[in-house]
Image (tube, rainbow, N blue to C red):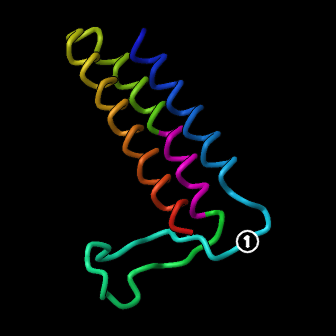
Amino acid sequence: MLLLSINAFLVIGGSLFIILSLSSSHSSGYIIQCRDCSNPAAVNKFTNGTITELLSFVVFAALVLVAHAALSYRAYNVHRQLAIAILALGVLLLALLIIVSNALLVLR
């Protein structure tokens, strides 16, 4: 139950962070992809997009929460440690989602 609460907290916190970081004055010009970012001399390494591409992170976070909750619920009858591992991997995935969305929003 604790891991499910942590997953829900990360989804709510990450979604609020993304939504509050988006400015309504910039309808385009958000960086949605960074290719070859380790090379400073790379040409066309940033791909611009709109708000909808960044809002897909919020949808993905909700899908991760629902999918991991359903998978762990079904796996709990089979093996308790498997259900815990599924929820722990959900925490890792949501933490990476927050890190990546923060990196893309800072580059704008």
In the rendered picture of this protein, how many numbered marks are placed on residues? 1
Q: Quadrant of residue 43?
A: bottom left
Residue 34: x, y in percent?
39, 72
Disc 1 element:
loop
Name of the residue lying farthest toward the bottom: 43
Name the one closer to the observer, 89 or 10: 10
Identity of the residue drawn at 43% across and 71% down: 33
Residue 47: x, y in percent?
48, 79
Q: Amino acid at mark 1?
A: Ser
Q: Is residue 60 magenta?
A: yes
Identity of the residue drawn at 34% across and 76% down: 35
| Start-end of magenta stretch | 53-63
Q: Is residue 77 magenta?
A: no
Q: Quadrant of residue 56?
A: bottom right
**Measured along the vertical axis of the image, is residue 96 above or below residue 83?**
below
Lateral position of residue 75 relative to residue 107, left or right: left
Residue 101: x, y in percent?
49, 53
Residue at image mark 1: 27
